[in-house]
């Protein structure tokens, strides 16, 4: 009774008749959901766009780059490439144990 699920495997493989080749790489739309575009240079985005990628750049408090500067760069790139670059912002963890931390983070987000 437990092994009946194994009967479905052949059907799963038969359903996978279409496939991609390297010739399709530039044609297939792709999303890179985890990049850190910390420069306004368009070299990497241009390469990604050539390969049909949409980019989602992540800002983080872990880098030495200031989060305000990261967001500025992300906004510039997102405005220059509105259908191809998106970003996720972050907030500072400095003074996270302060009673004012949540209010300061909310004020920055708003």
Image: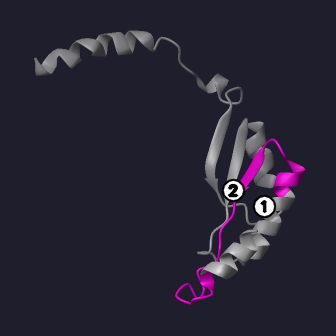
- The quadrant holding residue 77 is bottom right
The answer to whether one can see residue 26 in this image is yes
- Which contiguous range is marked in magenta? 77-101
In the image: residue 97, left or right of residue 71: left
Disc with the residue nearer the chain's start (1 vs 2): 2
Q: Whole-percent x and y of residue 52?
A: 73, 35
On screen, 100 above or below 14?
below
Cβ atoms under marks 1 and 2 closer than 8 Å: yes
Quarter of the image containing the N terminus? top left
Secondary-structure class at tag 2:
strand
| Residue at the image position 12 percent from the left and 22 percent from the top | 2
Give the residue displayed 83% in from the left and 63% down from the top: 40
Q: Would you call the spot at circle 2 few (<14 residues within 10 Å), some (14-19), or many (20 or more)?
A: many
Between residues 22 and 101, which one lies in front from this camera angle? 101
Protein image colouring = one colour
Residue 94 percent coordinates (x, y) = 60, 86
Q: Can you give x and y, in whole percent of width and height, for residue 46 in the image?
A: 81, 46
Res. 57 mark: 2
Q: Quadrant of residue 75?
A: bottom right
């Amino acid at each position: 009774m437990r092994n009946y699920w194994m009967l479905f495997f052949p059907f799963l493989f038969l359903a996978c008749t279409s496939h991609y080749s390297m010739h399709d790489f530039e044609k297939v739309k792709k999303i890179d959901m985890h990049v850190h575009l910390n420069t306004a240079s368009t070299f990497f985005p241009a390469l990604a766009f050539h390969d049909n990628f949409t980019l989602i750049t992540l800002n983080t408090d872990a880098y030495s780059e200031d989060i305000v500067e990261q967001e500025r760069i992300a906004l510039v790139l997102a405005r220059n490439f509105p259908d191809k670059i998106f970003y996720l912002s972050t907030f500072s963890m400095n003074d996270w144990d302060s009673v004012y931390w949540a209010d300061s983070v909310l004020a920055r987000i708003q």
